[in-house]
Image: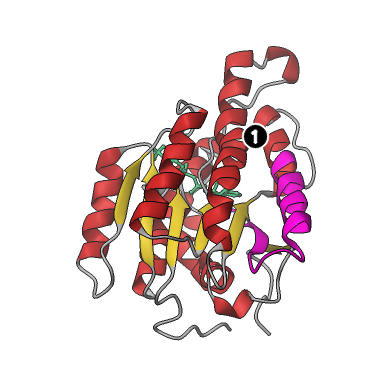
Amino acid sequence: MYNPGKNLLENRVILVTGAGDGIGKQAAITFAEFGAELILLGRKQEKLESVYDMISKMDTPKPCIVPFDLELCEEIAYSRLATKIQEDYGRLDGLLHNAAILGPRVPIENYAYKDWEAVMQVNINSVFLLTKFLLALLKKSDDGRLIFTNSGVGQKPRAYWGAYSISKYALNGLAKLVADELENTSNVVVTSVNPGATRTKMRNAAYPGENPDSVKPATNLMPLYLYLAGPDSRNEHNSFFSSEDDFSK
Ligand code: NDP
């Protein structure tokens, strides 16, 4: 069992996407509990404010809120975000690519192109853009972490899951490609994580007939997420983790 120290993430600036709900919300709160300074990126201001309020009550640095729609923002907005982080923090020690949308579950021949585009925009194109513009800031960290969130359906295609499944395949490729590029050229450790079945809004939409209590809560994932965000994963470059892994022997 991984037993992280209370100050594991002290002096680390970490950006979490989709920080307003689900796994991203829990990760942001947990990273703050362990001392990190959080940049909370998400689509809905009110959800981010609620996470901000929770973190503000802790004895930890105040987070910053970034309302940002990963589907609708143009490339220039990503570039401006990087400039703002450079001005405010001068570096980034962690980037958790967490936000995603499920999209419809229908056969390919019935899959509307606008749905395909939306899923691809949030789940892979925005991840490319954030990585492209924020990599320079991660390289300024002594010990940067770039974490991609994958899924079982990104390892084995799932009939009717269309763009979601394919976007996770592409994400796997992007993570490996970036890891390869950074192998000998930076201190940035690149990892991927498949959280597995977790009790969230997305899981509920995917499996409406399931009793949510039969699925693990996001809190169960946090030892793994802390491991990936903190210094103990220094030797895990280009590794893929799943929630079932006994990751910290
Ligand atoms: P949720 O749907 O509960 O949360 C997703 C988060 O992403 C929300 O905060 C959501 O914001 C945000 N988001 C969605 N679209 C956008 C957008 N256009 N711009 C900005 N933020 C956006 O999902 P989970 O927490 O379940 O999933 C987190 C990650 O884990 C995803 O990458 C998912 O694919 C992966 N995963 C989850 C599993 C599970 O069982 N839960 C299993 C395997 C993988 P808003 O609240 O406004 O919608």
Camera-side residue of 183 and 223: 183
Tell me which amino acid carries mark 1.
Tyr
Q: Position of residue 3 (x, y in %)?
A: 51, 85
Q: Is residue 95 magenta?
A: no
Q: Is residue 127 above or below residue 11?
A: above
SS at badge 1: helix
Task: Please provide percent x and percent y for residue 24.
Answer: 45, 53
**Is residue 117 shown to the viewer in this render?**
yes
Residue at 72% from the left image edge and 52% from the top image edge: 178
Rendered image coloring scheme:
secondary structure
Q: Residues within 10 Å of mark 1 (few under 14, many from 20)?
A: many
Which image quadrant is residue 118 in?
top right
Q: Quadrant of the N terminus?
A: bottom right
Query: For the magenta stretch, what is the residue range?
Result: 170-197
Depth check: give the residue in front, 150 or 133.
Answer: 133
Q: Is residue 149 above or below residue 67?
A: below
Asked whether the viewer can see residue 103, the reply is: no
Q: Is residue 219 left or right of residue 107?
A: left
Query: Is the CB atom of the residue marked by disc 1 within 8 angstroms of ligand 1's nearest atom?
Result: yes
Could you say where residue 23 lies in the image, as x and y percent from the top left?
47, 54
Task: Work out which quarter of the rendered image holds the C terminus and state it.
Answer: bottom right
- Residue at x 36%, y 74% (from the top left corner): 35
- To which quarter of the image does residue 242 belong? bottom right
Residue 150's place in the image compared with 89, above or below, is: above
Classify residue 113 by image quadrant. Answer: top right
- Viewer-closest of 188 and 221: 188
Question: What residue is shown at x 48% (from left), y 60% (from top)?
Answer: 92
- Indicate yes or no whether the magenta region holds residue 187: yes
Query: In this figure, which residue is indicated by the disc labeled 1?
Result: 164
**x and y percentages locating residue 127 in the rendered image:** 59, 42
The residue positioned 66% from the left and 49% from the top of the image is 151
